[in-house]
Amino acid sequence: MTTPSNWQRKLLLIFLSEKRLNAGKIVKNYDGKSFDEMKTTIITESSCDLESLTDERKSTDLEIHLNNLKYQSLGDSELCFYHNTLIILMRRKYKIDKTFAEFERLWESESDYLLEHLSLRWIVSACDTFIDHSNNSIRAAILMNVITLMNTLRVHETKNFLQLSTNAEPMPLLNEKTDILYAGDLPLYDGLTYFRIGTDDSLRNMRKRYNKFQKVDKLATTILLAVFEKLQNNQSAFATLRQLHRDDWSKWWLD
């Protein structure tokens, strides 16, 4: 394997330092602030540097990246932005052990608030963070269910997008196909069947199995169940099946 030259090593160090430059100053901005105080502080344009905004999805410059992210977070609380900042700092390998300890403290203290106010994007990022940095393998395993759920759903939605022509409206449900799935099992592939809409209890049983994880990790299970419930109320395939369900006993969502 070729050994990097001196200039290559220096370039790499510059790149890595830029990714974390002024991280300590950013963290220091939150010194002395309580979680309750951050909840009541709302992100506004006045808290952003509007002249430094860029269209970059990810900037190597940490301050520019966080400024862009803050602008995208207008109307959110400072606590939500603080949570997301901790994740960014860990992704950039800034004092990972100390930052993760603060991240854990935040979730242990404010899980209900975070689950109510964070978007699915950042809840999923939080799960990735626990999986990557927690020493609790049971917690990581439970939260992998969130990642599997979301990635499977995104694959499904991406396939739908690719099959629709540009500017096409979503296809309506076809009554004749709905009737077929109401009537009984229809083969899918490799021994699987489509959901028997109206009465299928597969999702109810899945939720019950999720719920059993409460005995070993209440926080991780709370996150998993909260994400699963959010999916029932977005424009997802889960919501479509919920709309078509007829049997109260086998329903899988909360009232």
Image: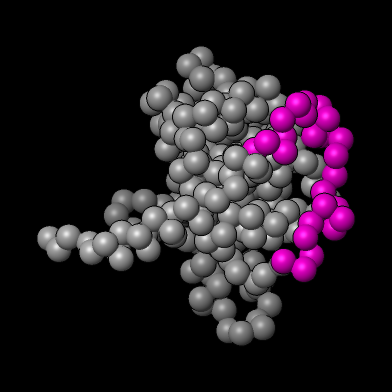
Residue at image coords 46%, 43%: 93
What residue appears at the point 43 percent right and 59 percent down from the top-left corner?
A: 14
Quarter of the view holding residue 86: top right
221 or 237: nearer the viewer: 221
Q: Any magenta on residue 47?
A: yes
Q: Position of residue 59 (x, y in %)?
A: 56, 63
Residue drawn at x 61%, y 85% is 166
Residue 44 vs 111, above or below: the answer is: below
Magenta stretch encompasses residue 225: no
**Residue closest to the eye, 106 or 19:** 19
Residue shown at the point (83%, 30%) measured from the top left: 37
Task: Give the number of marks.
Answer: 0
Image: 115 above or below 4:
above
Residue 82 in the image: state x and y as whole percent.
69, 40
| Residue 102 position within the rendered picture, expressed as x and y whole percent measured from the top left | 59, 28
Name the spot of residue 241 as percent of width and height, x first.
62, 51
Q: The magenta stretch spans which residues?
A: 27-52
Q: Is residue 184 visible?
A: no
Find the residue positioned furthest to the front: 6
Q: Looking at this rendering, what residue extends furthest in the top direction?
A: 215
Decide if residue 106 is in sight here.
yes
Where is the C terminus found, in terms of image quarters?
top right
- The residue furthest left is 1
Among the 4 quarters of the image, the one containing residue 11: bottom left
Vertical relation: 168 (above or below) 109: below
For this view, does 211 lie left or right of residue 3? right
Q: Quadrant of the N terminus?
A: bottom left
Q: 49 and 83: which one is in front?
A: 49
